[in-house]
Image (tube, rainbow, N blue to C red):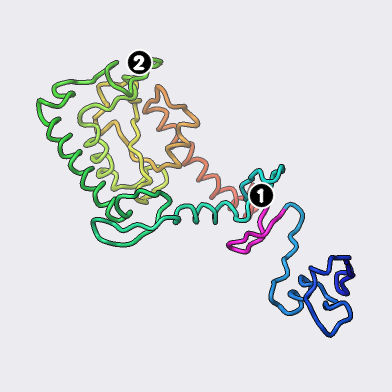
Amino acid sequence: MEKICTDCLEIKDLSKFTKDKSKKDGTRNRCRKCLNFKLGKTPIPKIPKDGHKYCASCGEEKQLSEFNIRFSWKEYKPFSYCKSCEHEKDNNRHKHKCPVCSKEYKSGSKEAGMCNDCRKIQLGKQGRCNMEKLNSDQQGENNRMYGVHRFGKLNPNYKPDKTNEEREAGRHILGYKDWVIYVYERDNYSCRYCGDNKGGNLNAHHLDGYSWCKDKRVDVNNGVTLCDKCHKEFHLIYNYNNNTRGQFEEFIKNEARSRLETIIFPLLIDSKLW
């Protein structure tokens, strides 16, 4: 026999209803499912949005792409657990006891040796032993690079596209660092063009270019202190190759003339003499 549930209005077999002797047919008017929902015995499942599903473990609503797919009952269905919860459960599936520190821990493998803390300590000791052995085997004459001078083409930073002139122009010679310090000290660590004396903002500029005037590369009288801004401004006008002392003198005169004009012209206009 069948009967209509008063809640879901579905026609169901009497076996789906709870027995009640006070009723004519011996069953209640609500089916077992609706009665359990009403009594709170069975939680009402949440209805997710389209393309989403609730994870049975964390209870969060996530996209279907965050669930693994399985083939069940001739169709593909997403897992009940999301990928992160499933991964966590797989990694904590089996219980173990560490033979070193006797600490109990879980892992995804049936056969596990030691816990992660003990494994890290052991790997650290093994790594140190390997490095000590490697260093002891490659010290002094045992080193495969002992006595090998990698200049020119043997150097790993060698650039075959450069010409000899370009290599010579960009190569710092012996005494170059001392020359830079002497130029800074003579100019009191200040730009000779604008007077800037901020630290880390200065350059030692060659009056006669480093690329062509080889005799004066470390001559203090051939150097002048410039800040970054003035140094770039000079080279924007006169380029970076074949610079001369005359170019710098011309650069200074033009700056003095421009400063004089900015001072005198407003005075002439105010005095109506212009």
| Residue occupying image coordinates x 40% and y 43% | 227
Q: Amino acid at mark 1?
A: Pro
- Residue 53 appears at what percent x and percent y? 69, 56
The crowding category of the residue bearing disc 1, from other C-alpha atoms within 10 Å (few below 14, some 14 to 19, many at least 20), is some
Q: Please tell me how many numbered marks the rendered image carries.
A: 2
Q: Nearer the viewer, residue 204 or 250?
A: 204
- Secondary structure found at label 2: helix
Q: Which mark is residue 165?
A: 2
- Which of disc 2 and disc 1 is earlier in sequence? 1
The boundaries of the magenta stretch are 52-63
| Residue occupying image coordinates x 12% and y 26% | 142
Q: Which mark is residue 78?
A: 1
- Secondary structure found at label 1: strand
- Residue 193 appears at what percent x and percent y? 41, 42
Q: Does the magenta segment cover residue 53?
A: yes
Q: Is residue 185 visible?
A: yes
| Residue occupying image coordinates x 65% and y 47% | 65
| Residue occupying image coordinates x 50% and y 30% | 237
Position of residue 79 in the picture relative to residue 21 (left or right): left
